[in-house]
Image (cartoon, rainbow, N blue to C red):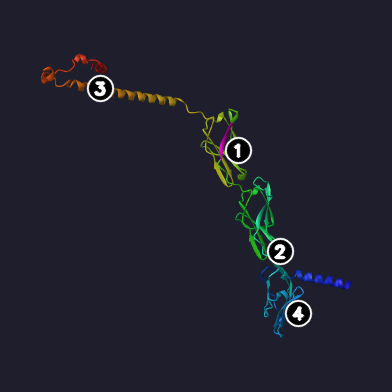
Amino acid sequence: MACCVFFLGLLAVLLLELTEGAEKVYSAEGGKVTLEPIVPDQFKPLTSILWKHNRNMVVEWIKNLNSTDYYGMFDGHTNLDIETGHLEISTWAHTYSGFYSVEFNGQLQSKLYTVHVIKKVPKPTVGVRPLSCSSTSSSCTLSCEGGTPEAEPITYSWRRDEGKWTQSSKLMNITKDDHHVKKFSCQMKNPVSVEESDPRKNPFYPEKVLKPTVVLNCSHTPSVCTLLCNGGTPEAEPITYSWRRDGGKWSQSSKLIEITEADHHYEHIFCQMKNPVSVEESDPWKNPFYPDPPVRPIVGGVLAAVVVAVGAAAVVGFLKRDAIKQKISNRNGSPRGGDPARSSGVTPHEEQPIMSSDKMTGSPSEVLTKL
C-alpha cells in the first residue's frame, strides 16, 4: 500500500513537471488550435503517429495499416497531417482543454502542450463607485466590469481621453485632481480576444459655467455694499471668480467682494466665472456709489428751449402783423358799396379814399377797430 502511494505521488510530480515545461496554447471556444511539433531527423520518415489528450487517445495513424483513427469527442473535430505530425483541433468547448502529447514511431516526444480553451472577453462597461459619486466627492473608484472566470486570464487597461492604454488592475481610483480628464475608457484583453468599453464621463470633469449675474446687498451698512457673483453650480466646479471695474483688467478674487463710497469713481462693475472648460462674464452692474449726472446742464437746456420758443412766437407775431397791414392796404384801394360814380356823382378821376388820413393813424389794432 505504501509503495502504491509513493508511486502515485511520484507520478503526480512527474506530470506536474511535464505540465510546467509544456507550451501553453490558448484557443477560443468555437475556434481552432493547431499543435505543431517538429519531427526529429531520426524519426523520418514517419511510420506512426499517436496523439493523446491527458491519458486518452485522440488520433492514431499507422502507415503499414494505411489507417487513421479518431477517438471520442475528437472524431469529426480533429485533423491530423501525417506528413508533419501537426494536429488541428476544433475547440468547441472547454472540455478540449488539457495536456497533449505526441509519439512518433512509438517514441514519446519531449515537446508537450497545455491547451486552454477559454471564452472571448465581452465588451466591458465602466462602473463608478459609490453610486453617489459626483464632482463634490473627494474620490471615487472606477471599475472595468464584464469579465467572467471562463475568459481568464484577463488583463485590464485604462485610458484617459484619447491617450495611450495603460495596463492596470480592474479598479482605478480617481480624485478631484483628475478634473482635467473629460472621459475614461477601460479595456479587457485575454490571449484570444480584446474589447474596450464606451467612454465614461469623468464625474470630476466640470460642466460649462453659466452666465453670471451680480447681486447687490447693502442691508447692513449703507456705506458698505456686498456684491455676489451669482450663477455657479456644483457640476461646474472648480470655479474661479474675477472682478473688473469699468474697462480695467480682470482681478481674480472670491465669489463675494465689498465696495464702499471710496469706489464712487467707478460707474460699472463686472464679474467673471471660469473653470477648466469655459468662461463667462456678467452684464455691467451700475455702481450704487457712482454719482448721478449734475442737474445744471438740464436746466440750461430747458432755458435754451424756452428762448427758442419765444423767438419763434415773436417771428410769427411779426408775420401776422404784416399780413394785417397788407389786408388794410388792399381795402383802402378798393371801392365800397358799388360804383362810386353812380352813388356820389363823382367821376372816377375824382374818387376819394374811404377814410381820411387822420382816421388811419394809430396802431393796426386801432385801425381795425375803426374799420
Q: Between tags 3 and 2, which lies in front?
A: 3
Q: Are marks 3 and 2 in contact (CB under 8 Å)?
A: no
Marks 2/1: CA–CA distance: 55 Å
Q: Amino acid at mark 3?
A: Ile
Q: Between tags 1 and 3, which lies in front?
A: 3
Tell me the quarter of the image containing the N terminus: bottom right
For the view shown, which residue lies furthest in the bottom direction?
64
The vertical placement of 320 against 171, above or below, is above
Q: Is residue 309 left or right of residue 115?
A: left
Dot 4: what SS?
Answer: strand
Tell me the quarter of the image containing the C terminus: top left
Marks 4/2: CA–CA distance: 35 Å
Who comes first in sequence, dot 3 or dot 2? 2
> From which residue to which does the magenta span run?
212-217
Please tell me the numbered disc located at residue 107: 4
Write the residue at 86% across / 71% down: 6
Please tell me the numbered disc located at residue 324: 3
Label 3: how many Cα within 10 Å (few below 14, some 14–19, many 20+): some
Residue 323 lies within the magenta run: no
Please tell me the numbered disc located at residue 150: 2
Label 4: how many Cα within 10 Å (few below 14, some 14–19, many 20+): few
Q: Which residue is mark 1?
A: 255
